[in-house]
Image (cartoon, helix red, strand yellow):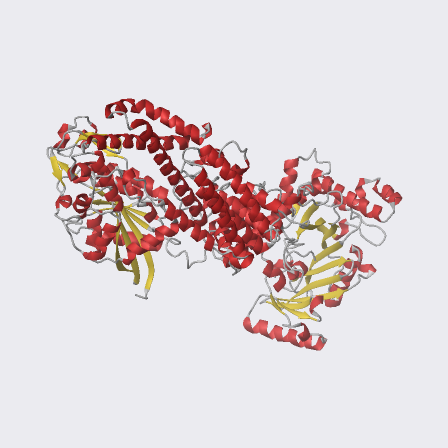
Amino acid sequence: MDDVIATLKILIIGEAGVGKSSLLLRFTDDQFDPEQSATIGVDFKIKTVNVEGNRVKLAIWDTAGQERFRTLTPSYYRGAQGVILVYDTSKRTSFDKLENWLTELRTYCTKRDVIKMLVGNKIDKDQREVDTLTGTNFARRYQMLFTECSAKTCDHVQDAFDELVHKIIQTPGLWDTEKSNSGLKIGERDGEAKASSCYGGCSLI
Amino acid sequence: MYDMQSTINDFPSRAHCLTRWYGVKEFITITPAKAEYAITSESKGNQLLSAVSICLSNTKCELPIFLQLQQLRRRLYVGLCLNRNFRANFEMVQLNNTPSQYRHLSGLIDIFKSKLVSLCCSYIPSAEISVSIRQTYILNCFTYSPWVPQEIPDLSNYITGGIGTSDFQSLPFGSIEDPITDIYLAATWPSVAESALVDNNLYSDLDPYEAPLWSVRAVMTKKPCLLESYLSRFIDVCRSVESTDELIGFANFYDNVEMDSHVVQALDKITDSSVHPILDKGLARIVSKATNRVSRAGSEESHIPSAVLSTVMQCLFPDSIKTEDRSYGDQSSSFYHNNTATDYSWHPINKYNSNSSSAPEGSLTHTLAISLCIINRNYGGLRAIAHLWREFIMELRYRWENNIIIPMLELEAPNLQFSLLHQKFQMLNCCILQRRKRELRSHSENLIFKSGNSLSYGKIMRSMLESRETEEEVLTSKLNYSDDREEESVSYQENVKVDGDIYVKDNASNDRSDMQIPIGVKEEFNLLLLETKTPMNIPITQDPTPMTEDMLSEQAEILTKLGTSEEGIRIRARMQSASLLSDMEAFKAANPGCILEDFVRWYSPRDWIPIECSGSQENLTQDNVSWYTQGHLSTRMRIPGNIWAEVWEAAKRSPAYKQKRLFDDTKEAEKVFHYLNNLKPSEVALQLLSVVVHAAIFRAKSLDLSNLPNVNTMIDSIVSRACRLSVKEHTDLLKDIKSIECIISARQSLAAKFICYEVEDYGLGKLEGFAGNLLNQPEVTIEGSGKGLLGKIINQAFVSSKKFALETFNEPHVAKQELSSSKLGLSEIWAQEFILRTQLSRPVSSSRPTPQRLYSACTKDEFRMAGTFCNDTIFQ
């Protein structure tokens, strides 16, 4: 485990019953549980993935979608590098509530350039209420990555997480803030004067 | 090679000395590593020079190489440059005194020509020589605009102490000494033909006022600055190791606390706090004064003069200095009333970095940070900090024990954006507020119990609406709410109202032993209960528990530790089900005869699947409530033994106010105090460091920064870096803050220097722009040179400086004479530089013409000539 280059914190949010926990279960354990119980508060899972030959540990926090639980969750937005925003493609209401979730995201996320991904879940269901184009447009408007998937049939679940992790890794300063001492130092170049053993840059003659 | 011919490098404003002397831009220098190794013998120098020559031809390097000869301080360089066509020799002479014949142009032209003749017999003396001349004048006497570093400290206000600290609200700023030491004025004649100017020992055409080009340069030295010194002392505190107890003694403090709580307790017993809040507050106030005096007497010999201490404390807790007849709580609202909104977009730091863990300006934490910073520098360092910190905690504790809201803090759950200390203070306020509510409720229960118990239930129900109002009025008046705190009191009253409501209902239900009366109802919901077909009530629930950052991470860690096993997930869910349970219990109490399905329809509507519903959920909003009662729970809610069902089973019928508190204010407050008490001064300082830096940045930002783009960039860079840093990183940050401070001070100083002269025609704004330019650019060209308006202003500065110099040397009559003509400001040349250039065919007349150059500079104590002589290496 020593070769893990980074631990990323990813948060899954969205209305109750859109399949957040199922999505997570599919990704981490490649399972689907039709009897997945409703999450209480927050839950989390860990998975280590390979990104361009580097091992990256993902701590994925799954949250409860119920309104009443939302008072608990803001704290878990802290320090998240990626957020997966899930809606149910067979339930228009779950899509309509996305704006609220985005507001919450803006309010509580501490990292400004957090990577957001919109995921339309349950595409296996015949009854579609949100078509792909609507989802794409919405994601574009709010600068989010976008995919549709099904936790039940396993379609695109892996891709969604992969894309998100890639994007996080490619964003400088998002996950490596401690290591990189970023920023040019602006100031007097006073070293120059001393080194040249003369009056220095400012000297008159 | 051709650098030396271009006039761009004439008199560079900021360059290496070799560029200045030889006009070359790129070069290599070979210098002795130590002064002892100086090459003093000429033959050794020549030997090295030939080595350089071989080296250059071997490597085909086209850059000139310079050798430093003689003592290093003489800065004597000779050099060589080779390329395929030409060879250039660089030679130099340096003397301590200027020979009189070389003081002027004609003498220099003579020597240049004779040198060229000696180099090449084919030299035609008539060849045109182009000349560039610069004269430099120094202004370093600024008597007419002396540097006033800060507002002169008010001596009557003895408590403030150091310069620039008028209060404890903002940090002092600015340089202590004048950061501008000299102003150089250069008059330049760029590239003129030798014949166009006459300059010899008898007569000179070189009148600086006629020079085509004037430029000014300001020399700034970094002098000690106030802000920087306050900050660096504060950073030093962060490195200390002593604890508060070690610094100001253990016993002293606890005696006082004990004393404090003793008296308060005793008084609590005498006065029924719930009945006579005003009296109680008044008495407690007196007690507090007494104990404060005691504590101050105890630590008198120590650290902060008591007058200073009380000023600081008043600054931190402004509500405590108001008149006695109003209770503490009144004034406390003034701050948060304006800032209750949780929207921090107004907060400037948000624009840059929301993660800087600072505190809002004007908040308690902010003021505390500044106070500690000032106290630290002016009143005894670490011990003073420890002292103030202890006083501060005592005041907090006093407030906690007497339910007095801490001022200058937003009344909200701890805001995780801010410093942990700030969060702790907010937490304390949450606790105080919670406790106030609790005590108010028990008080209202008493009232109702006394008045309402004998009445029949129906009467109570009927009179409830009115009695509620009056009851509130009573309570409100007792607490002496003022109008300006409406926001808080409204929510407060609401709680009282509904809680009172509950109580009445509950009380009555007990009387009638009827379990069907809803308890703890907040409002009706537009649904009917499935079984009883009565309207569903939304219960009053417990507020979410406020948490500080450390509590959250602790909790997250516990949750994480449970791992991802099946068991772990279950325990985790159970741990977090406390609020679910509480909500369920409240729901049960509010809805007699309800079932889990009802609860789910309120709590998680998507887990309720209506039978006829074909997905058109718009009906939700319709009033057709009965339609909605047909349906079933979602699969996940129907699994036997799922946690929701389990918790539902376990939930008792109990309204929120009767439940076990999810948020134990007493425990949490004590935890906060424990935390605060255990902080070492260094830890306090470390936590407040970013607040102090923030305050410093905004102190700088509060000044006029126009025309100083560098400063703005620097500030932005500091802001972006100022994010949860270590002490070391803060030290680096401090350097930049100091630069900023210096630059701003220098700008102020510069503007002040010129502002006293006749600037009406020029305009103040333009002058400030000029001052800014002086700092941004190495050299500023004066429009219109000596004849322009700005030129005149500068001349005035020189004139008055000279006048002062003369007056000081008791020669007022001379001064008057000389200054009758305002032109005479620039009379004493500090330095004069010449550059002579020509083209010459060397070594033979058939060679191609090559550039020849002579640079000469003379000041009072140095004369230097640097010659560059080229010859053709192909046609020779």
Return the residue nearer the eye: B869 or A187.
Answer: A187
**Quarter in which the N terminus of chain B is drawn:** bottom right
Counting from the top left corner in percent of width and height, residue B491 is at: 37, 32
Give the quarter of the image for residue B584.
top left
B873 above or below B175?
below
Counting from the top left corner in percent of width and height, residue B427 is at: 41, 45
Exactly how many numbered labels are in the figure?
0
Give the quarter of the image for residue B321.
top right
A53 above or below B436?
below
Return the residue nearer the eye: A95 or B87.
Answer: A95
Whether residue B523 is visible, yes or no, is: no
**Quarter in which the C terminus of chain B is drawn:** bottom right
Whether residue A45 is visible, yes or no, is: yes
Counting from the top left corner in percent of width and height, residue B382 is at: 56, 56
Counting from the top left corner in percent of width and height, residue B35 is at: 67, 72
Return the residue nearer the eye: B297 or A122.
Answer: B297
On the rendered structure, is B869 left or right of B437? right
Return the residue nearer the eye: B769 or B831.
Answer: B769
On the rendered structure, is B275 left or right of A158? right
Q: Residue furthest right?
A: B813
On the rendered structure, is A163 left or right of B68? left
